[in-house]
Each structure stands twice: as structure tokens, then as C-alpha cells.
Image (cartoon, helix red, strand yellow):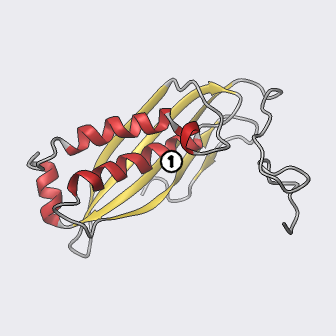
Amino acid sequence: MTGDNSTLSHVNAAGEANMVDVSTKEVTERTARARAVLRMAEATARAIQTDTVSKGEVLAVARVAGIQGAKRCADLIPLCHPLPLSKVQVDFTWLASSDGAALLAVDTLCKVSAQTGVEMEALTAASIAALTVYDMCKAIDRGMRIEQLGLLEKRGGKSGDWLREDANS
């Protein structure tokens, strides 16, 4: 392995992956918000909005899947710490598109009082919710795309608060 590993907390001096020791960190309230956007055909959006997808209520199932995904983050991402989440919220918003496609934003919020942040849980919730929408609608629209997965905001912890410049757009 090449390069300076001193700033990578998941890599030890020998360049090996390891779980960060957070035992000396202070327990603080931490929050994170993330978003994924699904691009789909208008017909797919109508089927979701009118609850006519044969697999059931797409957004209700995707919301539960996102919550479950956040709760299972440490099982999915090898070096994540298991966290006692105090809140997981998954919201959906239809966005305007200039190219005729329908856009569905999946916004997540995760909260915890812990020694480490909750960004990965928020990102996992957005990912799993978006993948669930895809799974439930793929028979209608295999061309759907999951785009723009990213962290919007994090609050708390030693590194302080962070807000994506375009987080409110």
C-alpha cells in the first residue's frame, strides 16, 4: 500500500484495515441526513402514486426497508460500529424534471447518542429504500436509475457540523 495512512482512521500504521477504537470518545447526540434520487418513467411514477404496482404499496415498503437497512448497517459495512439508533426517518418527495423523467427523492434522517457518527446509517437507509423501490417496480421499468446518493448533513461529534452546499436543493 502506498501513501500516507495517518489521516485514514480505518487503516493502521501497517496499512491494514481495522475497526476504529472509539472507547475514548465522548458520547454525544449525533444526526445525519442523506439522499438518493430515483429516475424513472412517468408511467412508473403514476403506478407508485396510485398504488397500482402489483407488489403492493411501494413507498410504505421502501420506508420500512430503509429503516431496517439503517438498523443493520454494521452487518452490511464491515468496519461500522453497531449503533443504538434513537430515530430513523425515511421520506419521499417527487421532484420536477426538465427531461420528461420522474424523479423521486429518498431523504433519510438518523439520530443516535453514541461515540461515533451516524452518517453510514443515513446513507444505508437511503440506499436500501431506493433499491426497494427499484425491486418493487422493475417489472414496469428496468431502466430506472438510482442517482445522487450522498450525505446532506451531519451534526455532532468531535469534527463538528457539516452541511452539503446544495443540501436544500
Quarter of the figure with the C terminus: bottom left
Q: Position of residue 109 (x, y in %)?
A: 46, 38
Q: Give SS at disc 1.
A: helix
**Image location (x, y in percent) of residue 127:** 43, 50
Residue occupying image coordinates x 19% and y 67%: 41
Q: Amino acid at mark 1?
A: Leu
- How many marks the image carries: the answer is 1
114, 124: nearer the viewer = 124
Q: Where the N terminus falls, by quadrant?
A: bottom right
Task: From the viewer's perspective, tell me whether residue 147 is left or right of residue 167.
Answer: left
- How far from the left and from the top, in percent, is residue 124? 49, 45
Judge left or right: residue 147 versus residue 159. Answer: left
Residue located 35% across and 52% down the image: 130
- Residue 86: x %, y % from top left: 51, 23
Along the viewing direction, whichever of 119 and 96 lies nearer the viewer = 119
Residue under numbered circle 1:
123
> Which residue of the protein is positioned furthest toward the bottom in this rendering?
99
Residue at 14% across / 49% down in the picture? 49
**Picture quarter containing residue 91?**
top left
